[in-house]
Amino acid sequence: MGRMEPVSPLEQALHAARALVLADLVAREVAEADVVSLVEDSVAQRRWWVEQWPEGAAFVAGLVAQDVQDALLDRYGRWPLCPVCGSGDPHALEVEPELGPDPHWVCHKAGVKVAAIGGLSSSLGGTSSS
Ligand SMILES: [Zn+2]
């Protein structure tokens, strides 16, 4: 009984957001079971949000990333820590734009765009600490 339902753009956006944020969690080695459930919670909430406002589908990844970041701050601490600034206080990257398409992790301290949401692993690949 193969039931083939067309996947709506909304559903695709939610799947993509979930995958991107999970990829970043894996990149920073915090993708434990309870953390994954934070992502699921956020995706569930954003599903409602994007159903009310389908034009916001492109913004979902950035919103889920911020939700998870906020939730992790309570339970785990700052995430994702900035990989750019080698010295000074450890600080988290921030999502920019907060509400817009093509969200990125940025370090406001260094004023640099570190990676796209979902791209943290490639930005950290082969870290050569000189
Ligand atoms: Zn930084």
Image (cartoon, rainbow, N blue to C red):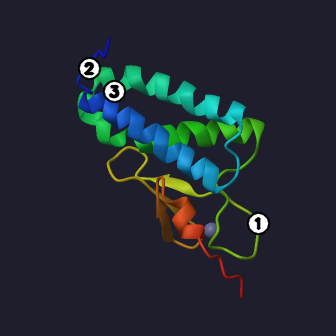
Pick out the residue farthest to the bottom: 130
Looking at the image, do the residues carrying marks 2 and 1 touch, with CB atoms under 8 Å apart?
no
Distance in Å between CA atoms under marks 3 and 2? 23 Å
How dense is the environment of label 3, judged by Cα within 10 Å: few (below 14), some, or many (20 and up)?
many
Residue that badge 2 annotates: 4
Amino acid type at image mark 1: Asp
Distance in Å between CA atoms under marks 2 and 1? 51 Å
Give percent across and percent down for residue 107: 56, 65
Judge whether residue 107 can be spotted in this image. Answer: no
Q: Secondary structure at mark 1?
A: loop
4 or 30: which is nearer to us?
Answer: 4
Q: Secondary structure at mark 2?
A: loop
Asked which quadrant contains residue 9, the reply is top left
Closer to viewer: mark 3 or mark 1:
3
Location of the N terminus (image quadrant): top left
Amino acid type at image mark 3: Val
Cβ of mark 3 under 8 A from ligand 1: no
Looking at the image, do the residues carrying marks 3 and 2 touch, with CB atoms under 8 Å apart?
no
Amino acid type at image mark 2: Met
Give percent across and percent down for residue 78: 71, 50
Asked which quadrant contains residue 62, the reply is top left
The answer to whether 89 is drawn above or below residue 100 in the figure is below
Dot 3 or dot 1, earlier in sequence:
3
1 or 51: which is nearer to us?
Answer: 1
**Which of the numbered marks, if any, corresponds to residue 89?**
1
Closer to viewer: mark 2 or mark 1:
2
